[in-house]
Amino acid sequence: MIASRRLFFALALPEAVSQQITQWRAEQFPEETGRPVAAGNLHLTLAFLGDVSAEKQRALLSAAIRLQQKSFNFSLDDCGHWPGSGVVWLGMRRAPRGLVQLAQWLRSRAARSGCYQSPLPYHPHITLFRQATQAVALPPGTPGWRVEIDSFGLYASIYQHGRTLYELLENWPLAPREGSAPEDR
Ligand code: 3AM
């Protein structure tokens, strides 16, 4: 039997930003909002793959290594609540083209490998709380953290001793941006 793992492609946040986000979250949201995601688990999902066999994982790895995509940056200047899925999230008003292209490419590659992809439009976000099913008073704004992204990774989601851990399996660099102007791409 081929072992399968629950996998997803995602962007990691710089540790300093994750710490600032969790501090801001603790100041802005009451404890009863939901189950907070641990600072080390904050991430932005690009494509969820589900349970993937070792064989399919190999095919996805070799496809990802061929991907050519430039680095990009974004501001985390938006925040919202999806009561249906119980998620309070941090996101961006305007997603850079590089991010949307990267996610679309990975999602379509995943679909071709037989990984079901939700038909809902892709909304890049970082989950702050889960199980937030009651009304949430959202803060009037966010500090708008600016994040520079120069790599993406493949992660395994592992549920162990009542906790979810994300293990980075592989990380791929994105190509440097032309020039040094801090513009979105
Ligand atoms: O980035 P977020 O937190 O929105 O909710 C899971 C998490 O997304 C999502 O994959 C990310 C890493 O676990 N996820 C879990 N099960 C899923 C499913 N069946 C799923 N996304 C889509 N379909």
Image (cartoon, grey):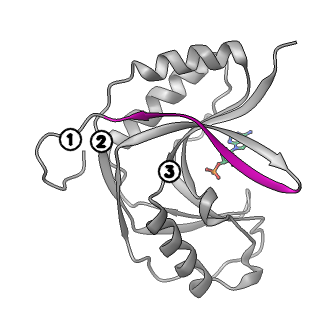
Considering only order in the chain, which callout, 1 or 2, is on the residue closer to the N terminus?
2
Considering only order in the chain, which callout, 3 or 1, is on the residue closer to the N terminus?
3
Q: Secondary structure at mark 1?
A: loop
Please, is residue 4 above or below residue 26 in the view? above
x, y percent for residue 76: 41, 64
As measured in the structure, the alpha-carbon distance from the residue carrying label 2 to the one carrying label 1 is: 6 Å
In this figure, which residue is indicated by the disc labeled 3?
12
The disc label shown at residue 177, or none = 1
x, y percent for residue 110: 58, 23
Quadrant of the picture in which ligand 1 is shown: top right
As measured in the structure, the alpha-carbon distance from the residue carrying label 1 to the one carrying label 3 is: 19 Å
Q: Secondary structure at mark 3?
A: strand
Q: Tell me where the magenta segment starts and ends, as one range.
A: 162-174
Q: Look at 55% across and 53% down and name the residue there.
A: 43
Residue 132 falls in image quadrant:
bottom right
Q: Look at 68% across and 64% down and name the residue there.
A: 37
